[in-house]
Image: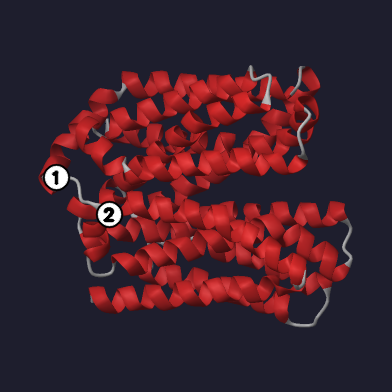
Amino acid sequence: MANLLLAIIYISFISLGLPDALLGGSWPTMQTEFGVPVSYAGIISMIICMGTIVSSLFSERMTKLLGTGKVTAISVATTAAALFGFSVSDSFIMLCIIAVPYGLGAGGVDAAINNYAAIHYSSRHMSWLHCMWGIGASAGPYILAASMTKGGWNLGYCWVGTVQIALTAVLFLTLPLWKEEKNGEEEHQSKKPLSIKEIFAIPGAKEIMTAFFCYCALESTAGLWASSYLVMQFGVSEETAAGLATLFYTGITVGRAASGFIAAKLSDKNMIRLGSAIIALGVLAMLLPLGEKVSMAGIVLAGLGCAPVYPCIIHSTPGHFGADKSQAIIGVQMACAYIGSCFMPPLFGILANHVSAGILPFYLGALLVTMTFVMERLNRIKE
């Protein structure tokens, strides 16, 4: 039964990644169809992000009330309904309205299932679970591309929504498995949900929140601006640059698959250090005046370095703060992650517009240094 539940969690992580690239891939067609500026994609993305932040902050309360299994099933069902809503949308306003449950569903399942995996499974499984997310995120654009040849972007959202509905059915049918696990977990749960003030008062909480913010800001900024950096700084063709930006995420996915094996030998702390060192090498390669090929290699190397950081920070949370507080802390971590992903890439865009896209390595380096500093500070606090 435990293996069956683990398999379901793996499938859930694939499903989590499937919708993530749909908006970016479908927007060129959608914005023409709805007659709105290209920049309006940012409005929808922001609404989704706000929803994920809100649901992440309330994840502890929901998990204590319903249990991880029900929260996961309800959240996936909410996301599925939103995807079907997107598929039948006929106006930009309708997209904005549907983006609200879209974000709420995504944030709820993300916080709940990450905490569950951090408590019940080893670090290697955490790395492989996030590798499954990468597979889902990579598969989403292919599903969308196939739908565009069959009937349009609407069909892509419908197909991914159907996958989410199927997963919802599986999750509800297997709720007894989660209940069995929950019985063994109840002794670790605190009696009442912690407030935001109480969470930040915990020694080390500010450090781990800052680290998560910086990591997600770094990853999302590199993923969004790597292509533009290569084009503007070195005159690389747009097609070549786009392919290398894809390799950044491929590096993360492949790196997480490899990290699962390495995690059996190294602690979460040392895995984070290893990943940070590899990111530093990638940023250094981008900084050195050695030409476009070295910078390209640096971007790919940065992706590989990012691989272990996210899953290992999450997996280390119950160990640092205890299983009774981990759901509350991971919920706020997720909120910090979405804030970093939402606001820091646009901030770089403003800086690049007024200074130069060539400052990307310095921007990434500053985030990396800050993340490393607060993680080492956390390690000293928790020693």
Which residue is label 2 attached to?
196
What color scheme is it? secondary structure
Which amino acid type is shown beneath numbered disc 2? Ile
Q: Residue furthest bottom?
A: 289
Which residue is at a point 21% across and 58% down the rendered structure image? 198
Crowding near the residue tagged with mark 2, few <14, some 14–19, many ≥20 C-alpha atoms within 10 Å: few
Crowding near the residue tagged with mark 1, few <14, some 14–19, many ≥20 C-alpha atoms within 10 Å: few
Which residue is label 1 attached to?
192
Which residue is at a point 58% across and 31% down the rendered structure image? 96
**Residue 95 in view:** yes
Question: Under tag 2, what secondary structure?
Answer: helix
Which label sits in the foreground, 1 or 2? 2
Q: Label 1 to label 2, Cα distance in Å?
A: 13 Å
Residue 290 percent coordinates (x, y)? 80, 81
Which amino acid type is shown beneath numbered disc 1? Lys
Residue 368 lies left or right of residue 349; in this view the side is: left
Residue 10 percent coordinates (x, y)? 43, 38
Q: Which of 207 and 272 is in front in this view?
A: 207
Question: Under tag 1, what secondary structure?
Answer: loop
